[in-house]
Amino acid sequence: MNKQNKITRRQFVTRTGQILAASTLTPLLSPLIPSAETVPLLSKKEAKYWKRLPEKRVECMLCPRACKVDDMERGYCGVRENQDGTYYTLVHSNPCSIHIDPVEKKPFFHYLPGARTLSLATAGCNVNCAFCQNWEISQARPEQTDNINLPPEEVVRQAVDNGCPIIAFTYTEPVVFIEYCYDIAKLGNQSNRKSVMVTNGYINPDPMKQLCTVLSAVKVDLKAFTERFYKEIVGGKLQPVLDTLKLLNQLKIWYEIVYLVVPTLNDNPSEITAVCAWIKSELGVDVPLHFTRFNPMYKLKNLPPTPIPTLERCRDIGRDVGLRYVYIGNVPGHEGENTYCPSCKKIVVQRIGFRVLQFNISGGKCRFCQTNIAGVWT
């Protein structure tokens, strides 16, 4: 351990106590038990964003894959099916995972800190990340998951009844259940429930624009900054994700970026410098960037967890480039979880894991020096 990283025994005991208190006082994952029953049936609702082709074929226009699908076949995501020349979503009102989470778990650090989210997902994804933490449902077809019959109005009711001001589309890939997301978010807005999306950003511009008319915030997983990584590890392409980020910036919806740091694959300092410089030049210095710790999962169990010094180096690079809000994720108790005022450098939001310990922002400004702190705070 470097000398600068050493802590005293008293600091260690204090930090450990804070982490235990955070995990004890606020459950990190509370299962929600809906009133509806588990059902084996698939939904059948005509999908959006597709066009007819000759001989009962269809072309999906939702994401950059542009799947051309024969009659009685499905697209890459496995949840959208061509039936007699009409394209259907099989997962509308048919989630397979529902929980109550803190918004910090998504993670959103600059969007309503401490708020509870009703978080849900259906089966399916339009990429196949080798490190996916939810692969049992993201890489499954809806016949292979335990699904709940939960229409949009019931989702909103559950959010209200459970004191959740936010509904989050997360865990798998919301792009593939976009119709469900849209209908929930539209209804949620009528009941003062905000909706947020946790996405890989692999989506075409028109669907993203329409969804953003009912969303309040978006978190994008930028998985690397090379096409090679996207091709070999993700099963997709980088450029469409960059285009999505630029679109979100143009739409002026609140968004944050997560970069999962995978040892030996996307942690080269030159790549980290390049991605930080791109964010600064194309998106601005106020976009929160989370460098998150990788843990061995799915097809990448041969790699070790990301060393904490690697994450600290990434954070230092981001701040040296000029980004104002750069975080370290999946390391509870690290100072890199806190939000610091870019002017006076004092802590304006202190966190331990998913728990907010201090909140020193008033009217969107630092309480100490009145500097504007980018985000949605109330």
Image (tube, rainbow, N blue to C red):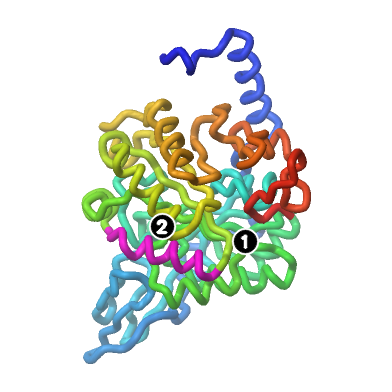
Label 1: state its secondary structure: loop
Is residue 31 or residue 355 the one in the foreground?
355
Does residue 302 sit above or below 362 in this rendering? Answer: above
Front in this rendered view, residue 347 or 189: 347
Q: Position of residue 210 (x, y in %)?
A: 52, 76
Residue 340 location (% of width, % of height): 62, 38
Magenta stretch in the rendered image: 236-251
* Label 1 vs 2, first from the N-terminus: 1
Q: Residue at x 40, y 43 (%)?
A: 260
Task: Report the residue marked by disc 2.
Answer: 200
Q: Which residue is mark 1?
A: 36
Q: Amino acid at mark 2?
A: Asn
In the rendered image, residue 209, in percent from the top left (x then y), is placed at 49, 74
In this rendering, which labeled residue sits more in front, label 1 or label 2? 2
The dominant secondary structure in magenta is helix
Q: Residues within 10 Å of mark 2 (few under 14, many from 20)?
A: many
Residue at the image position 69 percent from the left and 58 percent from the top: 159
**Residue 163: percent from left, percent from top:** 75, 53
Vertical placement of residue 127 versus 177, above or below: above
Q: Please tell me whether residue 267 belongs to the stretch shown in magenta.
A: no
From this viewpoint, is residue 272 visible? yes
Q: Looking at the rendering, in which quadrant would you find the N terminus?
A: top left
What separation in Å lies between label 1 and label 2 (alpha carbons)? Answer: 29 Å
**Is 132 situated left or right of 35 in this image?**
left
- Please tell me whether residue 247 belongs to the stretch shown in magenta: yes
Q: Residue furthest top?
A: 9
How many residues crowd around disc 1 within 10 Å: few (fewer than 14), some, or many (20 or more)? few
